[in-house]
Image (cartoon, grey):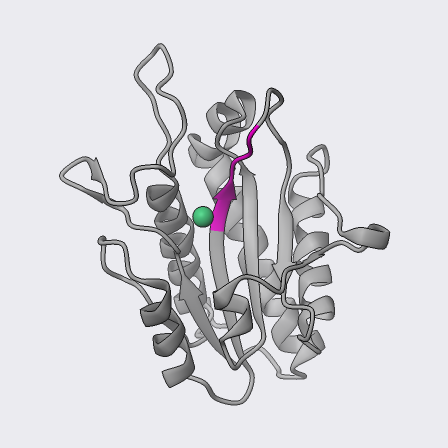
Amino acid sequence: MLVLLDNGHGGLIKGRPQTRERRSEEFPDGKQLFEGELNRAIINGMIQELSFMQIPYVHICPELEDVLIGTRISRANSHHQQNALLVSVHSNTNEGPRAGDGCEFLIHPNSSLGPSIATIFAEEFQQAFPNARLRRGEGGTPFKLRGDLGLLRRTRMPAILTENFFFNNERETRDILLSREGRWKIIDYHVAAIVRVMVEVFGENPVFRG
Ligand SMILES: [Zn+2]
């Protein structure tokens, strides 16, 4: 198995967000969430755990700058091999008077392995956050089909995009996205899902030494 890791948006350089619009409001105590920073923290935690378990990975956008979607797609495709899995980590936001809540798992409608992979991610998410909402697709599937996202549509390997809570939801942002405990739970459920995909979808045996 090869895990391809994508953190989507730009991070922070000298405190300045590289993808400015993807951020929470600034709270009265001065705290604020920048999605690109969160995505990197989750990916970096996953990298540590995958390394401990000797599961190979490629970080397709390690820069702090915002990397164009076309570049990220071609980097992912340049590493395509048997049993590759692309995981793109994000946090959500929505318009309107009521902030959304919970997590959702996006796959391309033509992905043959996507439904089993996304179901595993959804199960591990619910295990880690039993009181949080799993945002389901049409017909009640534990994932949503998105034909419009280039990262899912134009990549050659099975790919999943995880939307972890809503950064315009103050409770989720303060309690989960801006807390160490919340971030580690997000990291751990991603890693648990990857290990299950390796075994249950790709039929590989994990070589745990960590
Ligand atoms: Zn995002």
Q: Nearer the viewer, residue 177 or 181?
A: 177
Q: Nearer the viewer, residue 179 or 40?
A: 40
The mark tally for this picture is 0
Q: In this view, does 145 lie to the left or right of 167?
A: right
* Residue 155 part of the magenta segment: no
Q: Nearer the viewer, residue 167 or 109?
A: 109
Tell me if residue 167 comes above or below residue 84 in the rendering: above
First to last magenta residue range: 90-95
- The residue at 40%/48% (across/down) is 39
Position of residue 44 measured from the top left corner of the image (x, y, whole percent): 36, 55
Toward the bottom, the furthest residue is 82
Residue 52 in view of the camera: no
* Residue 94 part of the magenta segment: yes
Q: Which of 56 and 95 is in front in this view?
A: 95
Residue 199 in view of the camera: yes
Asked where in the image residue 62 lies, by quadrant, the reply is bottom left
Position of residue 111 measured from the top left corner of the image (x, y, whole percent): 66, 75
- The residue at 55%/22% (across/down) is 171
Tell me if residue 162 comes above or below residue 179 in the rendering: below
- The residue at 53%/89% (across/down) is 82
Tell me if residue 139 comes above or below residue 97 in the rendering: below
Toward the right, the furthest residue is 139
Position of residue 123 measured from the top left corner of the image (x, y, whole percent): 72, 54
Toward the top, the furthest residue is 28
Q: Is residue 50 left or right of residue 199?
A: left
Q: In this view, does 77 lie to the left or right of 64?
A: right
Position of residue 85 measured from the top left corner of the image (x, y, whole percent): 53, 74
